[in-house]
């Protein structure tokens, strides 16, 4: 089955991973800007990172027939440095018209601080001003519930935001309902330690239905599994769910969400792949 | 691509089938938890006053309640509380 991984950090992965993902049916992916594992020293460091995301990674992916897209921002961890964040936000528009840029992300909260919230709102402003889609990171573990509710407050307070163009990622059992009920898209991240498993993601699809739900690996430099989406497909098949349902979550939903972006120029593998499931 | 009528939630797998498939895995997870608790008891010192230990005990209690949202309740138990007055406490105002 062809699938799209809507959240994966390929700058941290090897070329062998691209090959493995291609063999497993990955036809496209989107890579949000995130934390490198250490705080970067200057805006120039981010400019180089955005060049890597918009120039180098699409070429590396294309070698294996994978279409690579990206999102730009300064992540929540580094948003504690408000001055640097503002420099990065001012520089982002240089890149917004580059091929493959889908919008602003992954912005969000980490420890749910005032500085993080301030920079989150300034990113929202940037997205509105340049008519960009938004991809949002929600915090991990004990901070997730509080942080997700705070993020939803800020989004819902801003009447300029088109909710159908916002994806709230890393939802779990206790946050998914709030995200979907407010009309946003929700992403489930399959991660070995701190987030969801393929089994629990399948449970969430059974409980909430497949509308506006996506599944991703968020594969990065930490313990993570870039092939997590195929794990989810396998779990759904073991439960005898129809192929049309699985395909909706791992292929059609990401397409429907991404197609709202100017920078999304997806070419389906063949005509059959682009037609709706009856 | 988008259809007008939303796809309904799919039918869950029958309980008997779930039990057949997951019995050994569930048994294994309970055993691991039991052994972890034994390990805590055997180790020097005591953690009974550690708030994390109290949370674990409370979470184990949630598992034996007959309800359909145990996973969600366990998640909430391990979550910091949300206060809808946070924006005022941060002295922040809604943007637009
Ligand atoms: Zn990420």
Image (spheres, rainbow, N blue to C red):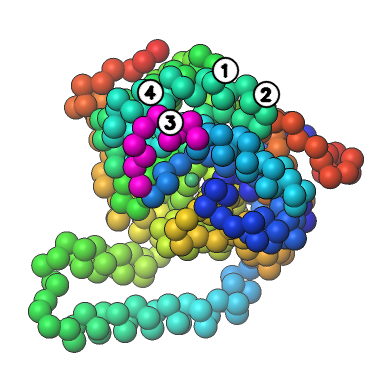
What crowding class fits label 4: few (fewer than 14 Cα within 10 Å), some (14-19), or many (20 or more)? some
Q: How many marks?
A: 4
- First along the sequence among labels 3 and 2: 3
Give the alpha-carbon distance from disc 1 to disc 3, as whole Å: 25 Å
Q: Earlier in the sequence, mark 1 or mark 2?
A: 1
The span picked out in magenta is A38-48
Looking at this view, name the residue that lies furthest to the bottom.
B42
Label 1 belongs to which residue?
A131
**Which chain's residue wears label 2?**
A
Question: For the C terminus of chain A, which image quadrant?
Answer: top right
Which badge, 4 or 3, comes first in the chain's sequence? 3
Choose the circle earlier in sequence order: 1 or 4.
Answer: 4
- Share a chain, discs 1 and 3? yes
CB within 8 Å, label 1 to label 2: yes
Circles 2, 4 touching at the beta carbon (< 8 Å): no
Whether labels 4 and 3 belong to a single chain: the reply is yes
Taking B83 as reference, is A76 left or right? right
Q: Residue at x 29, y 32 (%)?
A: A81
Up-down: is A13 above or below A213? below
Q: Are marks 3 and 2 in contact (CB under 8 Å)?
A: no
Q: Residue furthest right?
A: A271
Q: State the mark number for residue A233.
A: none
Asked whether, in this view, residue A130 is left or right of residue A62, the answer is left
Q: Which numbered tag is attached to residue A44? A: 3
């Amino acid at each position: 089955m062809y699938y799209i991984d809507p959240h994966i950090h390929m700058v941290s992965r090897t070329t062998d991973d691209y090959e493995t993902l291609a063999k497993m049916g990955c036809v496209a992916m989107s890579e949000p800007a995130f934390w490198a594992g250490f705080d970067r020293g200057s805006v120039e460091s981010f400019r180089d990172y955005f060049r890597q995301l918009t120039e180098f990674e699409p070429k590396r992916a294309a070698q294996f027939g994978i279409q690579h897209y990206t999102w730009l921002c300064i992540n929540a961890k580094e948003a504690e440095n408000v001055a640097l964040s503002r420099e990065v936000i001012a520089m982002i528009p240089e890149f917004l018209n580059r091929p493959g840029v889908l919008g602003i992300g992954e912005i969000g909260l980490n420890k749910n601080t005032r500085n993080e919230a301030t920079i989150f709102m300034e990113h929202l402003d940037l997205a509105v001003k340049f008519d960009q889609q938004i991809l949002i990171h929600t915090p991990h573990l004990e901070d997730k519930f509080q942080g997700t509710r705070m993020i939803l407050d800020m989004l819902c307070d801003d009447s300029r935001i088109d909710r159908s163009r916002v994806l709230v990622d890393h939802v779990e059992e206790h946050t998914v309902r709030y995200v979907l009920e407010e009309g946003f898209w929700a992403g489930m991240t399959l991660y070995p330690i701190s987030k969801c498993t393929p089994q629990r993601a399948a449970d969430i699809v059974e409980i909430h239905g497949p509308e506006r739900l996506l599944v991703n690996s968020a594969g990065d430099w930490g313990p993570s599994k870039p092939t997590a989406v195929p794990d989810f497909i396998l779990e759904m098949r073991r439960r005898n769910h129809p192929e049309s349902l699985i395909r909706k979550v791992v292929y059609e939903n990401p397409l429907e969400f991404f197609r709202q972006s100017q920078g999304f120029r997806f070419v389906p593998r063949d005509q059959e792949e682009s037609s709706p499931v009856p | 691509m988008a259809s007008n009528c939303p796809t309904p939630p799919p039918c869950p797998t029958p309980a008997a089938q779930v039990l057949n498939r997951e019995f050994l895995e569930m048994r294994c997870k309970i055993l691991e938890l039991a052994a972890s608790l034994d390990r805590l008891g055997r180790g020097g010192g005591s953690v009974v006053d550690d708030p994390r230990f109290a949370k674990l005990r409370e979470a184990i209690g949630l598992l034996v309640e007959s309800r359909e949202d145990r996973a969600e309740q366990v998640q909430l138990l391990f979550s910091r509380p949300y206060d809808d007055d946070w924006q005022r406490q941060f002295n922040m105002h809604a943007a637009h």
